Amino acid sequence: MIDVSLLSVIRRWYFRDGLSQREITRRTGLSRNTVRRYLKDDIAEPAYPQRDSHGKVKAFEEVLVSWLKREARRRRKERKTVKNLYEDLLPLGYSGSYDRVAAFVRKWREEQRLAASNQVYVPLEFAAGEAFQFDWGENYAFIDGRKTKLQVAHFKLSHSRAFMLRAYPTQSHEMLFDAHNHAFRVFNGVPERGIYDNMKTAVDKVQRGKERIVNRRFLTMVSHYLFEADFCNPAAGWEKGQVEKNVRDARSIIWQRLPRVSTLTELNDWLEAQCIADWQSRKHPQFTDKTIEDVWYQEQRQLMKVTAPFDGFIEHSKKVSSTCLVSFERNRYSVPASFANRRISLRVYPSRLSFVAEGQQIAEHPRTFMVSHDVPGKVIYDWQHYLLVAQRKPGALRNGAPFNTMPDSFKHLQSILLQRARGDKEMVEVLSLILHHDEADVVKAVEMALDASCPSKQHVMNCLSRIITPPQPAAIPIVNSLKLITEPTSDASRYDTLRGKRHAH
């Protein structure tokens, strides 16, 4: 396409100065057809010729529309990009450009947006204690100096508009159950109905209409709290519009002033305090003369009381390795040596792992989350789990990895005893005191033996005996302030009067 200024010169040469088309062609270097076209059509401004914007896309229009409708029903993060759709069209015979597909998708989405903006909705009104709405959101926070991606559980009471936020690393079942426990604790009760979308942790399969195959573990929680779970129609977020709006508003109301924290627990405590503070200051949208907190106080009377929180663990069957370790989420955790090569149960909580065998908890560890998939998994030891092995193999103390987690006083004592003959066995016997006495008392006894510069098993046991032996009670003082005015006399002859005359001689 030629420049506007050049077109103006061409028109002046031809219409004003009377130059021929051949001369104009020679001067400009343009083709004669180009010069003829612009002069013949009397064009004052150059433009591209109009082309059919659909062209080759039109033959695949129905396929593209069906794909776009399918993607619209999926969660935002699961949707295919336009480039993915273009690549899917190529095996079907599409030979056009990517730009044509992108233009078609933009136009279709704009039409859908305009159609949605013209939809009419019925205003919803909820009675006190009738329902709450739930949804997940996604935000970032600086935890322990690292920018961390978080999944945020949003709860909102439909009548009072009281809301609550709690952040988790993932959207898994145990996180969902823990979020409900804290929400009902903060709300001081449970509404009659909970409104959800069709999230995978709650719905195993969406069927026709309102029919759902609900996850069994989720149903157990619903049964525990005695509320009814109601699921929205697919792609009908307006059915829980209050919490949908809350997810958006929370970014500006709360997350913009988020502090840097050391732990996730500290962050959640801050979020809870911010939610309650917002209730106290924000006016209720319906009862404009009251705050959200005022209406919440009234709604509490209609909420079902929480008798006990739901024990929201997820259970897995695990095989203990020969090194007394159980694998979970690329990390490994130790259990007592007596359960090596056996199958046990692992109960997963949001912040801890409980290991159960024969109906009893045999070990517990804080849960460790992986920062990145590029980082290798960690091994979390409890050195006491390996005492039975050390009793049979005292030499394992020297290079045993689990024993690197012992208290510093034990390590100091070990460095001294291992220099002696049979020192490894003596150290194992000191460590075995943990099996029969409180660990803090044994640690104190070891420290006393080290301070006395006489570290040995006998001295440690002597110190431990003194620690656990209860102190002798203090002597009761004798009070001498009370004195008799008349001292008693001893007269044994008085007993003869009791014997009578019959026994007098």
Image: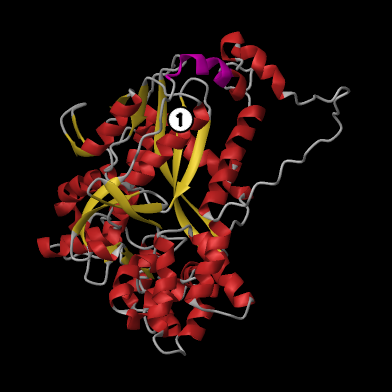
Q: Which residue is more in the foreground, 130 or 445? A: 445
Q: Which residue is mark 1?
A: 184
Q: Is residue 46 magenta?
A: no
Above or below, 390 against 69 in this view is below
Above or below, 314 against 281 in this view is below
Q: Residues within 10 Å of mark 1 (few under 14, many from 20)?
A: many
Query: How far across and down, in percent of the image, does residue 135 sit?
Result: 40, 38
Q: Give the residues drawn in magenta, as a range.
A: 295-304
Numbered marks: total:
1
Is 488 on the left-hand or right-hand side of 15?
right
Q: Which amino acid, mark 1? A: Phe
Question: Circle 1 — which element?
Answer: helix
Query: How far across and down, in percent of the image, does residue 187 sit?
Result: 50, 27
Colour treatment of the image: secondary structure
- Residue displayed at 30% across by 66% down: 330
- Residue displayed at 86% across by 28% down: 483
